[in-house]
Image: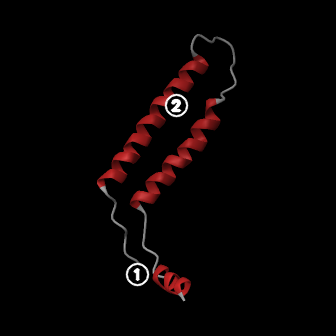
């Protein structure tokens, strides 16, 4: 069974920074879009929020759901030969 790769404090702090920037930028984009509008407005920030949200989820997965690759040592040995 593959072992989990332990995350470092720096990785977690960089993820939290990513999350904070994501939240602030999204609040700003949605506010700018709907500030003072009374008629229908195209919700363009939805595209940015969806794409960036997937990136945040991927970033979290690289930290907390990361396992070692058992075949990597074999691959490195084959490259050297």
Relative to 47, is 35 above or below?
above
Residue at point 53% right, 82% down? 75
Relative to 34, is 11 above or below?
below
| Residue that badge 2 annotates | 26
Q: Considering the numbered disc 1 on the image, is that residue within a helix, a strand or a loop? A: loop
Relative to 42, is 62 above or below?
below
Q: Is residue 29 left or right of residue 67?
A: right
Alpha-carbon neighbours of circle 1 within 10 Å: few (<14), some, or many (≥20)? Answer: few
Residue at point 51% right, 54% down? 58
Alpha-carbon neighbours of circle 2 within 10 Å: few (<14), some, or many (≥20)? Answer: some
Upstream in sequence: badge 1 or badge 2: 1
> What x and y, as percent, mark residue 29?
56, 26
Alpha-carbon distance for marks 1 and 2? 40 Å
> What x and y, as percent, mark residue 43?
65, 27
Question: Which residue is situated farthest in the front direction here?
Answer: 80
Name the foreground residue: 66 vs 42.
66
Residue at point 33% right, 65% down? 6
Name the foreground residue: 71 vs 67.
71
Specify the quadrant that holds the N terminus.
Answer: bottom left
> What x and y, as percent, mark residue 4?
37, 70
| Residue that badge 1 annotates | 1
């Amino acid at each position: 069974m593959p072992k989990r790769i332990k995350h470092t404090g720096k990785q977690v702090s960089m993820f939290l920074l990513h999350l904070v920037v994501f939240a602030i930028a999204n609040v700003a984009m949605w506010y700018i879009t709907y500030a003072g509008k009374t008629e229908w407005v195209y919700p363009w920030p939805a595209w940015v929020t969806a794409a960036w949200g997937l990136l945040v989820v991927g970033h979290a997965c690289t930290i907390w759901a990361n396992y070692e690759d058992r075949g990597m040592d074999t691959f490195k040995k084959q490259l050297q030969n």
